[in-house]
Amino acid sequence: MSLPNCPQCQSTYVYEDRDLYICPECSHEWSEGEEEALESTIIIKDANGNPLADGDSVTIVKDLKVKGSSQALKKGTTIKNIRLLEEAVNGHNVDCKVPGFGAMQLKSEFLKKI
């Protein structure tokens, strides 16, 4: 039987004590169900460190060049009804429709929650 790596420090020296897994390197304790819950809850934060959620409205905090377009996304542009992506593609973890541009994916570090 193989034991999972520690979800905090990725140590392989995990041992089992009754129904808990324990990491001797960072002293983290968790149960089998908690490990799956920790992996599935990803918190995406905006430029100020505020957590984002599906359906939030955000503004762009700096001018962003758009690949394949001569125009740029201007600072202060308001985007409504964002959708968070669990698996970020090249760091782009927010799916949205930008007024005047259409559907695109953006990095949350360039957005500010309204």
Image (cartoon, helix red, strand yellow):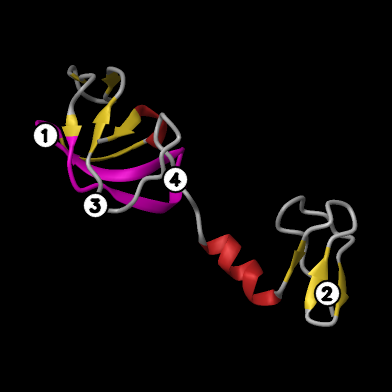
Disc 1 target residue: 99
Q: Give me the C-alpha separation between circle 3 and circle 4.
A: 13 Å
Nearer the camera: disc 4 or disc 2: 4
Name the residue tied to disc 2. Answer: 2
Residue under pointer 4: 44
Label 3 to label 1, Cα distance in Å? Answer: 16 Å
Q: Secondary structure at mark 3?
A: loop
Q: Nearer the viewer, mark 3 or mark 1?
A: 3
**Residue labelled with disc 3:** 55
- Near-viewer residue (68 or 98): 98
Q: Is residue 60 left or right of residue 28?
A: left
At label 3, which amino acid type do we have? Answer: Gly
Amino acid carrying label 4: it is Ile
Q: Which dot, 3 or 2, sits closer to the camera? A: 3
What residue is shown at x 63% (from left), y 76% (from top)?
Answer: 33
- Amino acid identity at mark 2: Ser
Q: CA distance from mark 3 to mark 2?
A: 40 Å
Q: Earlier in the sequence, mark 3 or mark 1?
A: 3
Cβ atoms under marks 4 and 1 closer than 8 Å: no
Q: Are marks 4 and 2 in contact (CB under 8 Å)?
A: no
Q: CA distance from mark 4 to mark 1?
A: 23 Å
Q: Tell me the crowding category of disc 3: few under 14, some 14 to 19, or many 20 or more residues within 10 angstroms, Cα based.
A: few
- Classify residue 54 as left or right of residue 4: left
Give the magenta-colored segment's residue range: 79-101
Which is nearer the N-term, disc 4 or disc 1?
A: 4
Query: Label 1 sits on what residue type?
Result: Pro
